[in-house]
Image (spheres, coloured by chain):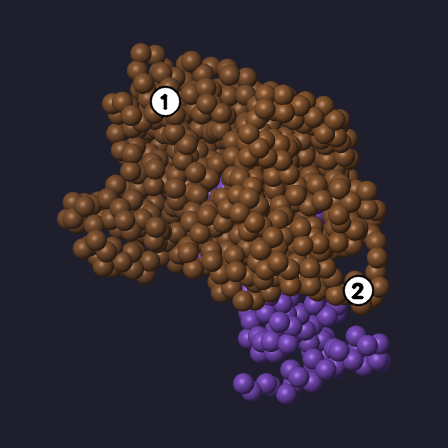
Chain colours: A brown, B purple
Amino acid sequence: MSQLAQSLILIGNPNVGKSLLFGCLTNRYVTVSNYPGTTVEITRARAAFGGETREVIDTPGTNGLIPQSDDERVARDMLLTTRGGDVVQVGDMSNLRRTLLLSLQIAEHDIPFTLCLNMSDEARERNAETDPAALSETLGIAVVATSALRRWNIEKLKRDALRPRKATIHATYPQPIEDAIAELTGGDLRGCPTRGMALSVLAGDETLKPFLHGDELARYDDIRERAQSRLPVPLGVAIANARVAAVDALIGSAHSHPTKAQNGFRDWIGRISIHPVWGVPFLFFVLWIAYLFVGKFGAGFLVDKVEHDLFQDRLNPLVIRFIDFIHTPHFLRELLVGPYGIITMALTYAIAIVLPVVMTFFLFFGVLEDSGYLPRLAVMLNRLFRKMGLNGKAVLPMVLGLGCDTMATLTTRILETKKEATIVTLLLALGVPCSAQLGVILAMLGPLGPEAMLIWLGATVGTIFLVGWAASKVIEGNTGDFILEIPPVRIPKLSNITIKVLARTEWYLKEAVPLFIVGTLLLYVLDALHLLTAIQRALSPLVVGGLGLPAEASNAFVIGFLRRDYGAAGLFAMQRAGHLTPTQTVIALTVITLFIPCVANFLVMLKERGQRMGLAIAGFIIAYSFGIGIALNYVMKAFGVTL
Amino acid sequence: MIHPPADEALERLWYQREKGRDVRFETTEDEERARGIVRRHRLAEILFAQVLEVDLKDAEQSACELEHTLTERVVDSVCTFLGHPPACPHGKPVPQGSCCKVYSRKVDPLVTRLVDLPIGSSGTIVFIAPKSMSRMSRLAAFGLVPGSEVRLLERKPSVVLSCGQTSIAVEDEIGSEIYVRPQ
């Protein structure tokens, strides 16, 4: 790292386009979607602002500076710890009220900032435009209207961002609170806080503790208690009400109330998708499209073309001929194109079997994300998720898990309580197959007919609900409230989808292919040392006796430890070679689906949930996945079910 | 609590007449008294059962006590607050008071739970009575405080409301904790 660059923090309400703006400012892509909570971590990148360099910091969206969940806390802490950096508040122009509610709190923390009213194009469309010049005069800070999507007015923002000022926006609180603020900020206390900190203290924000002077905590409590005794409503409520009143007075005086915009088709889709009756068929329609596109087109047509026509028939024979032609030593030949060869196994699996599915899935998923359907899905499923000790908000990480369980595990930070985060982490690792694996599974189940699909689907979906329900009883704690912003339905932009698909595909290649190669090397070495047959023999009571699979399937489970999709791809190859009967295929697939997704997911689990909980979850999953497989085997045998 | 037997007798008489029996009050004064008792009883039931969500048995018991103590002004305020309801939670008619006559053409309640609004219509928040305090601050962050204007967009499968340009999905329970004055 060269010399330190001054930082520039982007902060704002959820789903106002901070990440897109971050991309505009730094030319670095971070995931952008149309639902709150896409960003759960801090992202940094350097960028030139005129002649100066700034380290731009993207933060998770927050509704206020009194955090309600982990991701909001990350944003608040970033703002309070990076004193001296430039701050840009990003807001949705259509949503001035919420924007200013946050502005007011930043001002109360004595932090100079610039206000960026983003999504101005959408505001114009909805007839909710605001005049930045007038607002700038009212607030006493620079206000820039932008559209990050169209890269409009970014240069002006870059200029104004370096000239932050303290906003003059001010709220007056009931007298007992004002008195308490005076006492807290009066200088008598050690490390006396700003007005904003004083208000957070009064509102009872426990997460503020690290920022306060440790010796004075008792006095803070004392002051808060006295103020509370003079008020009929809880302090936090009185503070929130006064803030809204101050913002409303400001909006009422300077700006006309925006009229409700009519947008025929998109409004209609928005209404249909959360309709008590039509919402359900709409959901099935979306699933059906997903199946057609990812299952039939990606996993069926594309995999067949690439794997069969390209790799099996052309590429691999060509490589083998070339290797034979240059008289490669035997061990090297085996390493590259043998049964456990890097080209014939690792690359064929990664590129030919998994990649087409991953790409079609990311494409479909990108459209879904940007359209704003996911929060609406949360609305549809809230009541169902309640039964699992979760609320509708948990739909977001669960659906994201279909893209990548590891990433989704990080997204559990948007959930308010530890109980919810733990349950979702468990369910993600246990029952939600990631796109790579899902593709392989669909490709294998496709030719087997609907019964096989139903058994597999029943086992996985049943597991999610059953284990979720049981976990909600076993794990202590509360479920948070379902309060989720529903963004407007938007027509996905081809450019954003393209970038997103490419970025995610690149990430897949970087993350998965090396592990595929490591896995192959492991198998190769084990095979060369004749340990593979030993492992197969050792696992034989479980794999052959318990699950009723050929001994060879042990390989898939061994590499399944590295990546679940790699294990699935191994099963795929076995099925193609005719080594698995349909019944065996279903059993093997069910076990590998319920298995731990990959090493990366395991590590993230340990990091996010702590060693003990992480290991407990992993142990449970391994036992459960094989248990279900064995049960399935015996039940199908007992009833004489053959597929 | 000691109930003046006359009250009880009058009340019973009113109930019998409601069932269609041929009974008569001795004086119109008695009839007015009976009417007042039943009115207070049923309004108190609605207040407890629907607004405060006390279970129906407790509501009825408390209503039995309150029917003898509430003053007419308080009763009229309660009646207005509840929107001059035509029937109690058991479906029995609430005798009308003088306050109801003023509104005889407009029977919309003054204050109602957000979830009871017709879909697509809006109201001004009068008060929020949440089970937990953190809920209140979270709602406030979205600008949902008394005085704000909200519109009910959907009741099922989840309550969805809009406030300004923001649509927010909330817990069913929250939808019945927000009280609004319909527009």
The answer for which chain carries disc 2 is A
Taking the image as drawn, is residue B154 in sight?
no
Q: Quadrant of the C terminus of chain A?
A: bottom right
Tell me which corner region of the image, top left, top right, bottom left or bottom right, holds residue A127.
top right
List the residue tagged with mark 2.
A637
Disc on the earlier residue, 2 or 1:
1
In terms of depth relative to the viewer, which is nearer, B181 or A431? Answer: A431
- Disc 2 with disc 1 on a shared chain: yes
Residue B52, placed above or below residue A12:
below
Taking the image as drawn, is residue A578 in sight?
yes
Amino acid carrying mark 1 in the image: Arg
In terms of depth relative to the viewer, which is nearer, A65 or A253? Answer: A65
The location of residue A598, given as percent across then percent down, is 54, 46
What label does residue A46 carry, if any? 1
| Residue drawn at x 59%, y 48% as measured from the top left | A560
The location of residue A638, given as percent across then percent down, is 80, 68
Instruction: Name the secondary structure under disc 1.
Output: strand
In-image side of A198 versus A507 (left or right): left
In terms of depth relative to the viewer, which is nearer, B155 or A541? Answer: A541
In-image side of A15 versus A87 (left or right): right
The location of residue A286, given as percent across then percent down, is 74, 38
Of tags 2 and 1, the one toward the viewer is 2
Distance from the alpha carbon under mark 2 to that under mark 1: 62 Å
